[in-house]
Image (cartoon, rainbow, N blue to C red):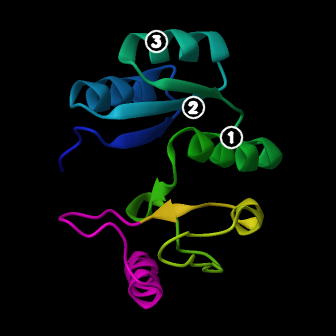
Amino acid sequence: MELLGKRVLITGASRGIGLSLAEAFAGAGATVALVARDGAALESLATRLGGTSHPADLLDTEELRGLVHRVEDEAGAVDVRAADLRGPVVLVVGQETTGLSSAWREACDELVSIPMRGSASSLNLAAAATVVLHEASRQRL
């Protein structure tokens, strides 16, 4: 998988496996968004790797919900392949030219994007919904 220019969210990033993953992804050219409870260690690592730090306790559901929005606000939606679509999902699809209104974006728990290659900059609504529904189906197999 090509990681140059990609953005990777890593939890538990301040030590152990999370730290090793953060270093490996950054070394492969990805921009890392780092999450852990230890804010000081996280900030130091983010500075060293050229990433961003997002101190959070993932056991706190309210903090977790806010975390997703902070990370998305910083650099855009999560790639649909990285989103967890195995549980109940309500799919809200924006129109091709303007996307979702700010009110709809605020109402969503998570925003996802579809990776695009080539000269097309967007998909029509039906095609976009099909891609996301296929990914949800794939994850549930």
Q: Residues within 10 Å of mark 2 (few under 14, many from 20)?
A: many
Assign a secondary structure to mark 2: strand
Q: Position of residue 96 (x, y in %)?
A: 47, 77
Could you tell me which quadrant the C terminus lies in?
A: bottom left
Q: Is residue 123 left or right of residue 43?
A: left
Q: Residue at x 29, y 32 (%)?
A: 25
Q: Position of residue 133 (x, y in %)?
A: 45, 84
State which mark lies toward you, 2 or 1: 2
Q: Can you name the residue that lies furthest to the right here? A: 62
Q: Position of residue 4 (x, y in %)?
A: 22, 38
Q: Position of residue 58 (x, y in %)?
A: 68, 40
State which mark lies toward you, 1 or 3: 3
Q: Residues under labels 3 and 2: Cα distance?
A: 13 Å
Q: Badge 3 is on which residue?
A: 47
Q: Badge 1 is on which residue?
A: 58
Q: Residues within 10 Å of mark 3 (few under 14, many from 20)?
A: few
Q: Residues under labels 2 and 1: Cα distance?
A: 9 Å
Q: Is residue 134 magenta?
A: yes
Q: Quadrant of residue 135?
A: bottom left
State which mark lies toward you, 3 or 2: 3
Give the residues drawn in magenta, as a range: 114-141
Q: Badge 2 is on which residue?
A: 35
Amino acid at the residue labelled 2: Val
Q: Can you name the residue that lies furthest to the bottom here? A: 126
Q: Is residue 17 left or right of residue 65?
A: left
Amino acid at the residue labelled 1: Leu
Q: Residues under labels 1 and 3: Cα distance?
A: 22 Å
